[in-house]
Structures are given as structure tokens and as C-alpha cells.
């Protein structure tokens, strides 16, 4: 009977340890994963020239800018996200499940982010799939930008008129 309780105790300890490890990996970004938040440092009045469009094409009531991330994910997983104003950057931000989507090492494919000027169709940028014909017809223009990012953290990517960089890394230099 004593051996039985010892075996049950060992199984219980293993269960607790495994549970703690899985909770840790869900609530943090591991060293081989990355999360992104993209910021735009371009004035709306300059979108036409940035996307090489005829002057007056961009209309804030009809269009929006989203970012296609350098990831390769399954169907119904977000490939795109909204872009935010540079004034909202917070480098000390911690990862929160549900607020960010972290991408595993096998989902990260390269360093080319793509800004997309799309027709405003409602919904979130996360539901936009540029590889699907329904959505690809809504793309007005695109601009690809190579950006070095790091794994193991939230990357605050700033895309400007002539440059793109990971803001919090550049700030520390």
C-alpha cells in the first residue's frame, strides 16, 4: 500500500510540474518565438507618395493601412495586423495572452514586412488574408520593407518614410 501512495505522489508531482511549465509557456514569449506590434510614422497626407499612387487616391474614409507580418501560418491564423500611431509605443509592455499573437520559430519565415493599403471593409486586420482571392482584390497598393526583429520578445516595429526598425532596440543603443 505504501508503494501505491508513493507512485500516486510521484504522478501528482509530475502533473503539477508539467502544468506549471505549460502555464509559463502560455504567459510568456519563449526565446524561439516572437510577437509584433507595428507602428506607422508616416503622415496620412504622404500615403499616396509612399505607396506610389496618383495624388488624391488615398481616402481615409475608404482606405486603411494594415501590415502583413513575415509569417507563414495555417488558415484562420492572423497574418496581418492593424498599425498604430508612433505616439502609443510602450517598450516596457509585457506579453498578455489574447492581446498579442506569438509566432513560433517554424512560423517565422523572413524579415519582410508588407504594408498594405486596402479598401476599408470593416472587421479586424487579423481576419484579412491577402492570399485569399476575396481579400486580395481589396488591396489598393503594397510596400515591402525588410526589418530586423528579435525573438523572445514583443517587437515594436516602426515603419517610417525612409526607414523601418525595431524601436525598443534602437532606443537602447
Image (cartoon, helix red, strand yellow):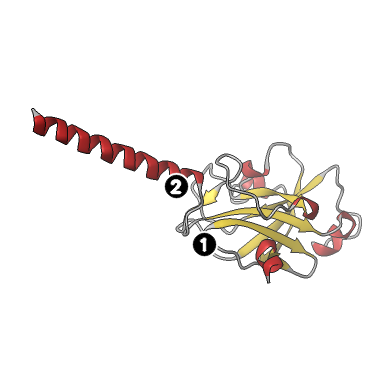
Residue pictured at 50% horizontal, 51% vertical: 73
Could you say where residue 158 lies in the image, as x and y percent from the top left?
Answer: 72, 60
Sequence-wise first label, 2 or 1: 2
The residue to which callout 2 is attached is: 25
Give x and y (percent) for residue 94: 60, 48
For mark 2, give the secondary structure.
Answer: helix
Q: Secondary structure at mark 1?
A: loop
Residue 65 rendering spot, x and y as whole percentages: 76, 51
Q: Quadrant of residue 1?
A: top left
Q: Position of residue 159 (x, y in %)?
A: 74, 62
Q: Any mark on residue 129, and which?
A: none
Could you tell me which residue is drawn at 12 percent across and 31 percent down?
4
- Measure the C-alpha gap from mark 2 to mark 1: 21 Å
Between disc 2 and disc 1, the foreground one is 2
Query: What residue sits right under mark 1 in the picture?
Result: 109
Question: Which residue reaches farthest top?
Answer: 1
The answer to whether residue 56 is left or right of residue 128 is right
Q: Quadrant of the C terminus?
A: bottom right
Q: Is residue 47 above or below residue 94?
A: below
Q: Nearer the viewer, residue 35 or 112?
A: 35
Amino acid at each position: 500500500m505504501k508503494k501505491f501512495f508513493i507512485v500516486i505522489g510521484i504522478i501528482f508531482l509530475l502533473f503539477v510540474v508539467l502544468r506549471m511549465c505549460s502555464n509559463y509557456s502560455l504567459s510568456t514569449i519563449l526565446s524561439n518565438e516572437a510577437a509584433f506590434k507595428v507602428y506607422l510614422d508616416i503622415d496620412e497626407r504622404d500615403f499616396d507618395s509612399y505607396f506610389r499612387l496618383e495624388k488624391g487616391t488615398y481616402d481615409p474614409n475608404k482606405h486603411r493601412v494594415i501590415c502583413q507580418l513575415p509569417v507563414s501560418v495555417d488558415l484562420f491564423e492572423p497574418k496581418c495586423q492593424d498599425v498604430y500611431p508612433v505616439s502609443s509605443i510602450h517598450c516596457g509592455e509585457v506579453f498578455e495572452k489574447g492581446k498579442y499573437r506569438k509566432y513560433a520559430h517554424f512560423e517565422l519565415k523572413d524579415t519582410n514586412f508588407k504594408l498594405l493599403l486596402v479598401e476599408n471593409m470593416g472587421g479586424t486586420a487579423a481576419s484579412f488574408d491577402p492570399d485569399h482571392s476575396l481579400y486580395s482584390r481589396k488591396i489598393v497598393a503594397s510596400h515591402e520593407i525588410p526589418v530586423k526583429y528579435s525573438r523572445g520578445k514583443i517587437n515594436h516595429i516602426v515603419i517610417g518614410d525612409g526607414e523601418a526598425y525595431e524601436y525598443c532596440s534602437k532606443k537602447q543603443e
